[in-house]
Amino acid sequence: GPAGFLEQDDSENWCEIQKLLKGHRARNSKLCLEMGLGQEKRRDDGIPGITNYIFSETAARGMYQRWADLLSSESWQEVLDKTAAYQQEVMK
């Protein structure tokens, strides 16, 4: 699935999560994708992009940012500029 959110054996887990999300607290909470925030790094082996420790939501944050950039940009150059700005901000 998108950003590796769903593997074949995850369907039961996701069904149970959906049941929990019907509760009062979940309905009144914002989506939180902060795991690993502030620990991002660039790889030394030439693989592009930004990575993090094995347990993080860096890939999910990057995927959603890219999606938003693709939907809101007027040109491919604007997408590239937004990507560069996002990566620069993340690596501060």
Image: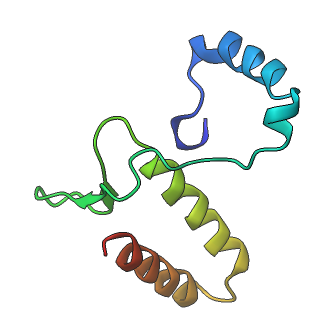
The residue positioned 31% from the left and 58% from the top of the image is 40
Quarter of the image that includes the C terminus:
bottom left
Q: Residue furthest front?
A: 25
Q: How is the image coloured?
A: rainbow
**Residue 76, percent from left and from top:** 57, 84
The residue positioned 52% from the left and 82% from the top of the image is 82
Disc tally is 0
Question: Image quadrant of residue 42?
Answer: bottom left
Q: Is residue 82 left or right of residue 58?
A: right
Please tell me which residue lies in front, 45 or 62.
62
The residue positioned 71% from the left and 79% from the top of the image is 72
Q: Residue furthest left?
A: 44
Up-down relation of residue 60 to residue 26 (above or below): below
Q: Is residue 23 left or right of residue 80?
A: right
**Residue 66, percent from left and from top:** 56, 66
The residue positioned 83% from the left and 19% from the top of the image is 19
**Residue 50, percent from left and from top:** 32, 60
Up-down relation of residue 69 to residue 67 (above or below): below
Question: Image quadrant of residue 16?
Answer: top right
Please tell me which residue lies in front, 25 or 90.
25
Quarter of the image that includes the N terminus:
top right
Q: Is residue 58 left or right of residue 1?
A: left
